[in-house]
Amino acid sequence: MKIVFIGAGSMAEAMIQGLVQAPLLKGGELWVTNRSDTSRLEGIKDLYNVQISYDLPSLFQGTEVIVLAMKPKDAKEALLSIQPYISEGQLIISVLAGLSIEFIEGKLRKGQPIARAMPNTSATIQQSATGVAFNDYVSDGQKNIALSVLEAIGTVTVVEENKLDLVTGLSGSGPAYIYYIVEAMEQAAVELGLPQAEAKPFILQTLAGASNMLLTTNKSPQSLRKAITSEGGTTEAGVKKLEQHHVKEAFKACIKEATEHSGRLRNQFEQFDNE
């Protein structure tokens, strides 16, 4: 299978790093291009042993999957530049935050098979949580191809396209929220006298253990939390502080804002395109 990435930013690199470790690409080809940053392309080539090229006609020849991973603000120019060289049968997978299938289709052609996906940077270690939606022109065979590509970098859930803004706010941006929590835990540990290097193993294993408890026990987070929150105990004291600072409401607001911003980005780019 030949896969071409258009764009070589952080999301593209995360996916590439995950894909090159996957059996999917054994005997296959992974190509990368971008607008003009040759040093970035050379770095990607050296790190992951992939092919790079600016020769669009040969780049798309024999390609089954084209991954759109450029910056959304560069999408219009990039789509118009590749349109003459792609065929109706090639599957487009877009990982562009906020940009709709309709927008992409409008810059390529009616009838182009398009999957719109939202992975996250945990694709680097094949642990992404990805949501994906398809337009009506994606065949069953192409859906299987798209799913196999995305499953190579983590778990995949098929959703309606109108849910992808929420997926963006929830899991696309989600790793950053967890890293933010880890930052706070590390800072608290240091302030209380435990060096960061010593605190880190406790924090990371605590997160990994809690995640695995949710995955393997089939118990709700509320029931697991209550099971370790003894009346008058240390956990209860800590949780009361979280409630005092409205942490749950803050996280809900965080996810809501990221979700709504995904929609605002779409409106911004698509309105700009119509001016």
Image (spheres, grey):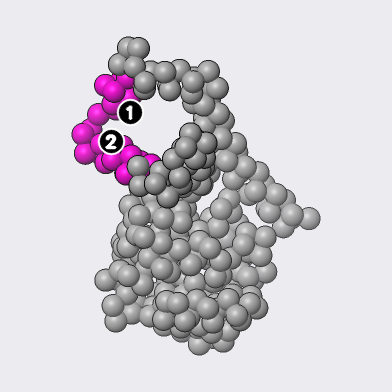
Q: Find disc 2 in the rendering and name its residue.
A: 214
Q: State whether the magenta stretch is mostly helix, strand or loop.
A: helix
Where in the figure is residue 144, as x and y percent of width and height? 31, 61
Q: Find disc 1 in the rendering and name its residue.
A: 221
Where in the figure is residue 70, as x and y percent of width and height? 58, 65
User: Which residue appears at 62% of the width and 42% of the height?
Assistant: 261
Q: The N terminus appears in which quarter of the rendering? A: bottom left
User: Which residue appears at 60% of the width and 57% of the height?
Assistant: 103
Q: Secondary structure at mark 2?
A: helix
Q: Are circles 2 and 1 on residues that touch, CB within 8 Å?
A: yes
Choose the circle earlier in sequence order: 2 or 1: 2
Residue 270 falls left or right of residue 138? right
Of residue 106 and residue 30, the one placed in the foreground of this image is: 30
Numbered range of the magenta stretch: 203-229
Where in the figure is residue 66, as x and y percent of width and height? 47, 71
The answer, for residue 142, to whether it is visible in the render is: no
User: Which residue appears at 35% of the width and 47% of the height?
Assistant: 201
Question: What residue type is disc 2 on?
Answer: Leu
Where in the figure is residue 262, as x and y percent of width and height? 59, 45
The answer, for residue 265, to whether it is visible in the render is: yes
